[in-house]
Image (tube, helix red, strand yellow):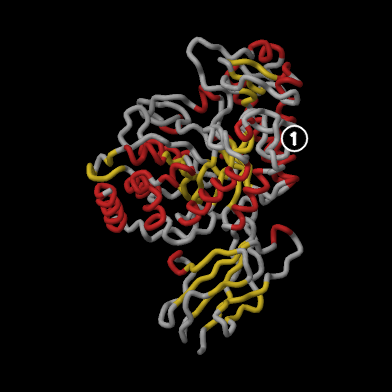
């Protein structure tokens, strides 16, 4: 316990020295909640809800503003799907629904919005069965249409070469969009399967039958994935244009160990998105098909094969055309020693580096339960230092840049409540979804640039003020679904 307190003091002192406590006003602060770790198994729906509620409360306290919730792990569902069976990761048996009729995604959306968090539905587009899944439900797509799959080292994979699989994946996403008020659709790092030595992908016959003019099977495979990403982009825009589409690729795009012409890849040595998983993330960003990118840079500073600093700088330099968020591994970070400060783990150095780069707009924690467990005082540092002030989401003007109208009838009543009315709007994209309340002392210059003046980000139309003093000024602005911010409305305390 004493060692942990000393380490926390070191984190706080390093943070103060680096002035990281001047937190940005806009920052994505996400956390992944996964199903594949088995955290739901053996629990009743009520017990799962209690566990997740506790996690969300703690994550809210430490400033997390977006949850990436896994709802499709292997052609299954943690929601009421029109196409796929209930997940075994939820109930223990694929195809068996929660005993009390619970819909985890509907519940999670409600719980996140109640805590002023975004909720992104996290799906895996290609994996249909893991090697550990023994039985498939009768309505599972691999049972109904085995011809659409190929087997690879015990996995079943939706064959990316088949147009019918792209259409089917779009139908799954459409089903989510039409039935749930999600803020984003999120995909992780599983595209073509991770390579296994001596095991070939069994798709050569499909390539020979329809190469589409590609000279190599590798380029053809990349285009198969490109076509899906493109289709999903246009689908999401057509149904819910405010819904964000993001990916979380493996942390290495391509290896370029010599560092010559680094645009082609980073000075690393590991599995590659481009050459091994056939996922050309740089191309997706350049085409504008994804709205955000969260590379999983889970290694530590000084890792020989994949150095955190090398990778975060590479992604910043070559994949910054869309907001870049960094996937942070909580447990690895606190187990690593800062190469420049042997008395500290790597969290302060990683955050200092992350916030120094112009195209990095936040981070996402792998994984939510690890944050809650607070190893090495990681969660405490988020709460007291890096997320000590609230943050709006990064702007995405390529989706929408029009701000909502300002709040109406802003006033402070005699009971110390700040109240206002919603601005008028005809279209969904123009409606106010949340409000930002700022506080300024009597002699303080009014500026909305600093997060330190934010009292709350709320979806309510009133706020109990922490204190009311003559001359003090409160400011209220409106936010739309994409956090475009309205003009401010000020109210001065006169009594």
- Which of 187 and 91 lies nearest the eye of the viewer? 91
Residue at 47%, 78% (x, y): give it.
467
Q: Which residue is mark 1?
A: 171
Name the side, left or right, on which 156 lies relative to 383. right
| Label 1 packing within 10 angstroms: few (<14), some (14-19), many (20+) | some
Q: Residue 492 location, x and y as percent?
A: 52, 83
- Which of 37 and 298 lies nearest the eye of the viewer? 37
Q: How many marks?
A: 1
Name the side, left or right, on which 442 lies relative to 478. left
Examine the rendered structure and indicate whether residue 49 appears above or below residue 466.
above
Q: Residue 240 location, x and y as percent?
A: 71, 48
Residue at the far bottom: name it.
495
Residue at 43%, 82% (x, y): give it.
442
Location of residue 403 by image quarter: bottom right
Q: Does any portion of residue 257 appear in the rendered image?
A: yes
Name the side, left or right, on which 131 lies relative to 94. left
Q: Does any portion of residue 288 appear in the rendered image?
A: no
Examine the rendered structure and indicate whether residue 30 appears above or below residue 188.
below
Q: Residue 363 location, x and y as percent?
A: 46, 46
SS label for mark 1: helix
Residue at 65%, 79% (x, y): give it.
409
Location of residue 230 by image quarter: top right
């Amino acid at each position: 316990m004493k060692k942990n307190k000393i380490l926390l003091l070191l984190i706080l002192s390093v943070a103060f020295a680096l002035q990281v406590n001047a937190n940005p006003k806009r920052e994505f602060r996400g956390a992944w909640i996964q199903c594949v770790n088995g955290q739901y198994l053996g629990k009743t729906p009520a017990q799962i809800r209690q566990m997740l509620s506790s996690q969300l409360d703690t994550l809210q306290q430490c400033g997390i503003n977006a949850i990436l919730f896994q709802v499709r792990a292997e052609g299954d569902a943690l929601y009421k799907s029109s196409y796929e069976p209930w997940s075994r990761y939820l109930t223990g048996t694929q195809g068996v629904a929660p005993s009390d009729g619970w819909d985890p995604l509907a519940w999670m959306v409600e719980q996140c919005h109640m805590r002023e968090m975004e909720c992104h539905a996290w799906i895996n587009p290609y994996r249909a069965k893991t090697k550990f899944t023994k039985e498939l439900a009768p309505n599972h797509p691999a049972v109904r249409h085995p011809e659409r799959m190929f087997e690879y080292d015990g996995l079943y994979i939706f064959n990316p070469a088949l147009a019918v699989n792209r259409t089917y994946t779009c139908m799954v996403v459409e089903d989510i969009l039409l039935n749930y008020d999600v803020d984003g659709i999120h995909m992780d790092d599983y595209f073509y399967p991770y390579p296994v030595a001596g095991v070939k992908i069994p798709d050569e016959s499909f390539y020979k039958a329809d190469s589409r003019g590609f000279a190599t099977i590798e380029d053809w495979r990349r285009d198969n994935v490109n076509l899906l990403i493109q289709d999903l982009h246009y689908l999401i825009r057509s149904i819910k244009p405010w819904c964000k589409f993001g990916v979380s690729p493996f942390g290495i795009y391509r290896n370029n160990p010599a560092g010559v012409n680094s645009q082609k890849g980073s000075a690393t040595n590991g599995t590659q998105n481009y050459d091994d998983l056939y996922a050309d993330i740089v191309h997706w960003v350049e085409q504008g098909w994804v709205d955000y990118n969260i590379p999983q840079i889970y290694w530590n500073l000084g890792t020989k094969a994949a150095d955190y600093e090398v990778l975060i700088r590479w992604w910043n330099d070559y994949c910054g055309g869309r907001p870049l968020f960094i996937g942070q591994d909580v447990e690895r970070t606190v187990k690593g020693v800062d190469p420049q400060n042997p008395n500290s783990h790597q969290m302060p150095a990683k955050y200092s580096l992350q916030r120094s780069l112009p195209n990095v707009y936040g981070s996402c924690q792998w994984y939510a339960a690890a944050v809650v467990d607070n190893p090495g005082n990681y969660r405490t540092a988020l709460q007291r230092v890096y997320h000590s002030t609230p943050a709006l989401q990064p702007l995405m003007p390529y989706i929408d840049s029009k701000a909502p109208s300002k709040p109406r009838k802003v006033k402070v009543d005699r009971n110390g409540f700040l109240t206002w009315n919603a601005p008028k709007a005809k279209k969904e994209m123009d409606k106010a979804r949340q409000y930002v309340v700022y506080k300024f002392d009597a002699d303080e210059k009014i500026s909305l640039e600093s997060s330190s003046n934010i009292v709350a980000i709320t979806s309510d139309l009133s706020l109990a003020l922490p204190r009311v003093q003559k001359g003090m000024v409160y400011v209220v602005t409106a936010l739309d679904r994409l956090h475009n911010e309205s003009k401010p409305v000020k109210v001065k305390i006169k009594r």
